[in-house]
Amino acid sequence: MSLPAGDLRELVAVEQPVEVRNDLGESVQTWEVVARRRAAIEAVSYTEQQLRQQLGGSVSHLVRLRFIEGLSGKMRLRWITRGGRLLYITSVVERNDREYQEVSCEEKVT
């Protein structure tokens, strides 16, 4: 199954954590954008959320996007077309010989 371009209606920024020093010399974590991609994002149903929690994870959204080398659970997605909502990656699955990735995410409100 391929990923039709017409399904990629949302814009996301992939961010990774970086450690920087503040004015006091303390190490502070900030986020750096490593890629921007069009994506298909769908909310996960309550039933599917319960099933995934039984398997050891919490998921609120499923994101499909073109392949990004090195995408991992240490990163997060900033959902640009929805006001910068934050989706923290819980798992990444490569599909169709690295054509695209299915990313399970948990939205956290700040």
Image (spheres, helix red, strand yellow):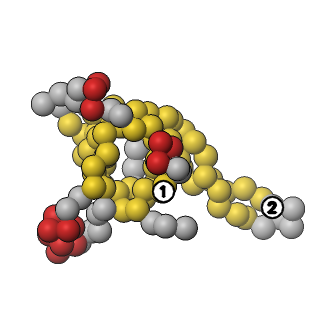
Residue positioned 35% across, 34% down in the render: 9
Q: Dot 2 surroundings within 10 Å: few (below 14), some, or many (20 or more)?
A: few
> Any mark on residue 22, and which?
2
Q: Label for residue 86?
A: 1
Residue appearing at x 49%, y 55% in the figure: 85
Amino acid under label 1?
A: Leu
Along the viewing direction, whichever of 84 and 99 lies nearer the viewer: 84
Q: Residues within 10 Å of mark 1 (few under 14, many from 20)?
A: many
Report the amino acid beneath label 2: Asn
55 left or right of 98? left
Q: Is residue 59 shown left or right of residue 74? A: left
Q: How far is mark 1 from mark 2, CA to CA?
A: 24 Å
Decide if residue 69 is in sight here. Answer: no
| Quarter of the rendering containing residue 68 | top left
Q: Where, by quadrant of the figure, is residue 43 drawn?
A: bottom left
**What SS does tag 1 mark?**
strand
Percent position of residue 11, x then y: 44, 37
